[in-house]
Image (cartoon, helix red, strand yellow):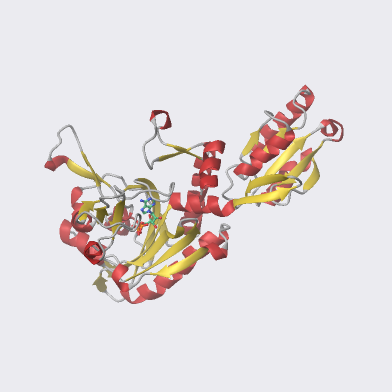
């Protein structure tokens, strides 16, 4: 993990927020490569779940919502963490069961006895809408994107007239005032979620849940996560959220242990029923064939953008011995790699080579995310590109001026091909599987 954190800072993936002021704990900023990687993760998710599905509609709801939404959802009442403080080592311990103190009164970190009484803490960030800070203007920063989709259920029925099953998909920021944030970007107070709310007939919910678990599991594998680092973990009955009938987490084997990337839950008809009750709106679905009116069940695959990004980074990190050196390379899937091509002149003191390399880079930029770099010797330039996962390095040398060919180096195999400049776009298109 330390190596990942250090690479992220050194190469411009992720920085600590407000670092020049000493940083704000557990908040992170995505730098030039980080934002590309994050955007690529989101684009891959959107492509798989919106563009490639006939029955899923994308949307983008606001972060601030009517406060009643959070009463209906149960967040005001029960979105709590329970924690104890160790009087000895001062560590804060998040517990699922307040009986822990009674049972042991022992700190799991320092092993000494002396814990405070359990304290309950609502995880929702509060703020005020408008100039007056009173109860009437209280609003919350949404702790999940899901509710934005439930409250738009009726709008979607009226505007798209979909037949069951159909879904809504959304990517956006969520905020939780976590008691124990940490492990780099794994648990933060501001993060991004990628969520689908898939509305189904109640009798089809169990089957659809299984299908979604498989589909979401494959998504991570198809984007290169190693099979041995990914697992499905069904929730036990006592772990289930109050609204869920069943839930399976997709977990990644991080250095700090198996941890959740995404949860796929059968939320039953809880959400639509509750919102119907609190809003006094009819949120039932009318089945034209059977002439029945009912609340659909909801299958919810809910994943974190930041956690996925972290898993993709960790999984792609490789160190390999090359001659007497250690080569660090991020073997990111081609769809996720922030930079697809780097154009590097072999000799930067030869203006003809520099000019040709810049011209090639300019041309490639029209098709692929391409960078030009001449700020170091070729060995160092390769190392830099390997560390950020650039798929192909195109080197322009003296020979290129004569034979109008360049050397293309593959990130993973380090194999070099000599390619004619006028065939370069086509060659890279084939490799990257995109249109040239
Ligand atoms: P955890 O048990 O780890 O707190 P959760 O079960 O509360 O997570 P959900 O409410 O199911 O999480 O949220 C869906 C997804 O949102 C999670 O799988 C995770 O990827 C992401 N997520 C939730 N909380 C955070 C957080 N504090 N920081 C980063 N990502 C988060």
Q: Position of residue 174 (x, y in %)?
A: 34, 48
Q: Quadrant of the C terminus?
A: top right
Q: Is residue 101 above or below residue 421?
A: below
Could you tell whether 411 is left or right of 242 in the image? right
Whether residue 161 is visible, yes or no, is: yes
Instruction: Name the residue rendered at 34%, 46% in the picture.
Output: 189
Depth check, front residue: 418 or 87: 87
In the image, 417: left or right of 4?
Answer: right
Looking at the image, residue 118 lies above or below residue 426 = below
Report the residue that reaches farthest toward the right.
402
Residue drawn where x is 35% and y is 55% of the image:
109
Q: State the image quarter where residue 106 is shown.
A: bottom left
Residue that sits furthest to the front in the current view: 112
Q: Position of residue 2 (x, y in %)?
A: 51, 46
Q: Quadrant of residue 96?
A: bottom left
State the image coordinates of residue 156 (x, y, percent, origin top left).
32, 56
Q: Quadrant of ligand 1?
A: bottom left
Q: Nearer the viewer, residue 244 or 405?
A: 244
348 is higher (above) or lower (below) than 291: above
Q: Is residue 302 left or right of residue 328?
A: left
Could one spot residue 284 in this view of the protein?
Answer: no
């Amino acid at each position: 993990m330390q190596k990942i954190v250090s690479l992220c800072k050194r190469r411009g993936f992720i920085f600590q927020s407000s670092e020049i002021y000493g940083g704000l704990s557990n908040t992170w900023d995505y730098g030039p490569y980080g934002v590309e990687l994050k955007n690529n993760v989101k684009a891959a998710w959107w492509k798989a779940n919106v563009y490639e599905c006939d029955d899923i509609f994308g949307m983008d709801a606001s972060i601030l919502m009517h406060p009643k939404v959070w009463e209906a959802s149960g967040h005001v009442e029960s979105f709590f963490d329970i924690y104890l403080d160790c009087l000895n080592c001062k560590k804060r311990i998040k517990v699922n069961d307040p009986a822990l103190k009674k049972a042991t009164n022992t700190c799991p970190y320092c092993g000494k006895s002396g814990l405070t009484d359990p304290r309950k803490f609502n995880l929702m960030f509060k703020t005020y809408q408008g100039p007056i800070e009173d109860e009437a203007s209280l609003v919350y920063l949404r702790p999940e994107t899901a509710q934005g989709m439930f409250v738009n259920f009726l709008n979607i029925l009226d505007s798209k007239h979909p037949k069951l099953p159909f879904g809504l998909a959304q990517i956006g920021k969520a905020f939780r005032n976590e008691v124990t944030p940490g492990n780099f970007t794994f648990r933060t107070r501001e993060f991004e979620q990628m969520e689908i709310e898939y509305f189904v007939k109640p009798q089809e919910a169990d089957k659809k849940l299984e299908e979604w678990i498989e589909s979401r599991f494959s998504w991570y594998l198809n984007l290169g996560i190693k099979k041995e680092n990914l697992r499905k973990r069904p929730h036990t009955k006592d772990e289930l959220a109050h609204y869920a009938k069943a839930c399976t987490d997709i977990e990644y084997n991080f250095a700090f242990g198996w941890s959740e990337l995404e949860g796929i839950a059968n939320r039953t008809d809880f959400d639509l029923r509750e919102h119907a009750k609190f809003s006094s709106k009819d949120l039932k679905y009318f089945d034209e064939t059977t002439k029945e009116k009912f609340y659909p069940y909801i299958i919810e695959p809910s994943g974190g953008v930041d956690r996925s990004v972290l898993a993709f980074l960790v999984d792609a990190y490789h160190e390999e011995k090359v001659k007497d050196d250690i080569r660090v390379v991020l073997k990111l899937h081609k769809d996720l790699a922030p930079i697809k091509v780097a154009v590097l002149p072999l000799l930067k003191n030869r203006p003809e080579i520099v000019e040709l390399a810049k011209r090639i880079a300019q041309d490639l930029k029209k098709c692929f995310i391409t960078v030009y770099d001449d700020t170091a010797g070729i060995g160092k330039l390769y190392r830099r590109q390997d560390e950020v996962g650039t798929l192909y390095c195109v080197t322009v040398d003296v020979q290129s001026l004569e034979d109008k060919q360049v050397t293309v180096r593959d990130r993973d195999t380090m194999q070099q091909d000599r390619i004619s400049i006028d065939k370069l776009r086509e060659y890279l298109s084939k490799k990257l599987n995109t249109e040239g």
